[in-house]
Each structure stands twice: as structure tokens, then as C-alpha cells.
Amino acid sequence: MNNLIELKLDENNELVFEINIQGTDAPDAKPIVRYIIEDTKMSYTFTGKASDGNVNVDVPVLLDSLKEGIYQSKLEVIIGDRYFVPLQTNVEFKKSLSVTAESITINKKQVISESSPQQQPAKQQPVAVAKIVSHTTKQVSDVDIVTLKQKFKK
């Protein structure tokens, strides 16, 4: 079992095998050919169509049945009352390469949350940055302090 057949899980696959049947026991008997993929809990059998020394086997999409990985497989040939396994190999299932894209719309307006409907969205105000160039301090004496009462008394 040193051969490895690579198949796609999400596509239909067609396998072609060349078989050579020799012997005189059943010259008129038509062979029944099956391709079997064995999983730990279940085996999958696909009937082959033999013609002119070749066998065509269609393996359908198995995305819902198998996971990506390597499985054992074999080709069975039944002629009359005789059973043969002329090929045992591993089959590796992979998903096809695919690329998807979705458009994303970004809403620039702020959304009011449902938990606090009375809360208004804050408006963004322009920000001004100022730098202090010079700083002077003036001493305030008691004479300079005027209360409002004093100011309006006049």
C-alpha cells in the first residue's frame, strides 16, 4: 500500500483502473468491479464499469460523509464465484482550494444602545492644541479683591 490516490471531498472524482484478467475458467463471465473506501465506522462501495481492460469508478461528493484525511481503499473484482483484490492503496481526501470575499459596510454614524435610550451620542468637537509661550504671575492684594456684593452696592 505504498501508492496514494488524492481525491477532492467537495467534487465528483473519476478513477480509471487498468485490469488484466487471465485464465480460461470463465472466459464469457463479465467481471463485477467495486472500489471500496474504508473508514473506521463505515465503508463506502462504488461500482465500477469495466470495458476494454479499463474500469471507470465515479466517486461522488463525500463532504458530508468523510473528513479530510487518509483512508484505506481497495479494488475488488468478482468473476463468477471467484473473488480478487488486485489493488490495495491509500486514498487522501482534501477539500478544494476556495477563496471567498464579502463586502463590509461601515456605518459612520454612532448607534444609540438599547440599554440607555436617553443617552445622546456625543458630537465630536474639533480639538485645539495650545502651547504656553510665556507665563506671568500677578500677586493679588486684599485691596484688589472685590466681592459681588461690593461691586453692585455702588
Image (spheres, grey):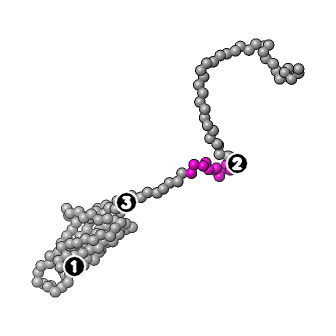
Structural distance between the alpha carbons of marks 3 and 1: 34 Å
Q: Amino acid at mark 1?
A: Ala
Whether the magenta-drawn stretch holds residue 96 is answered as no
Counting residues from the N terminus, which is met first, the one under dot 3 or under dot 1? 1
Q: Which residues are magenta?
A: 107-119
Structural distance between the alpha carbons of marks 2 and 1: 77 Å
Structural distance between the alpha carbons of marks 2 and 3: 47 Å
Q: Is residue 151 left or right of residue 92?
A: right
Residue behind mark 3 = 98
Residue 118: assigned label: 2
* x and y, in percent, of residue 59 in the image: 30, 71
Residue 50: assigned label: 1
Circle 3 crowding by C-alpha within 10 Å: few under 14, some 14–19, many from 20: few
Residue under the image location 34 percent in, 67 percent down: 11
Q: Which one is in front in this view, the residue at disc 2 or the one at disc 1? A: 2
55 lies above or below 2: below
Q: Secondary structure at mark 1?
A: strand
Q: Please indicate, yes or no, whether residue 36 appears anywhere in the rendered image.
A: no
Residue under the image location 59 percent in, 25 percent down: 131
Q: Amino acid at mark 2?
A: Gln
Q: Determine the residue located farthest toward the bottom in the rendered image.
A: 28
* x and y, in percent, of residue 40 in the image: 32, 66
Whether the magenta-drawn stretch holds residue 112 is answered as yes
Nearer to us in this view, 58 or 27: 58
Q: Secondary structure at mark 3?
A: loop
Counting residues from the N terminus, which is met first, the one under dot 2 or under dot 3? 3
Write down the quadrant of residue 1 in the picture: bottom left
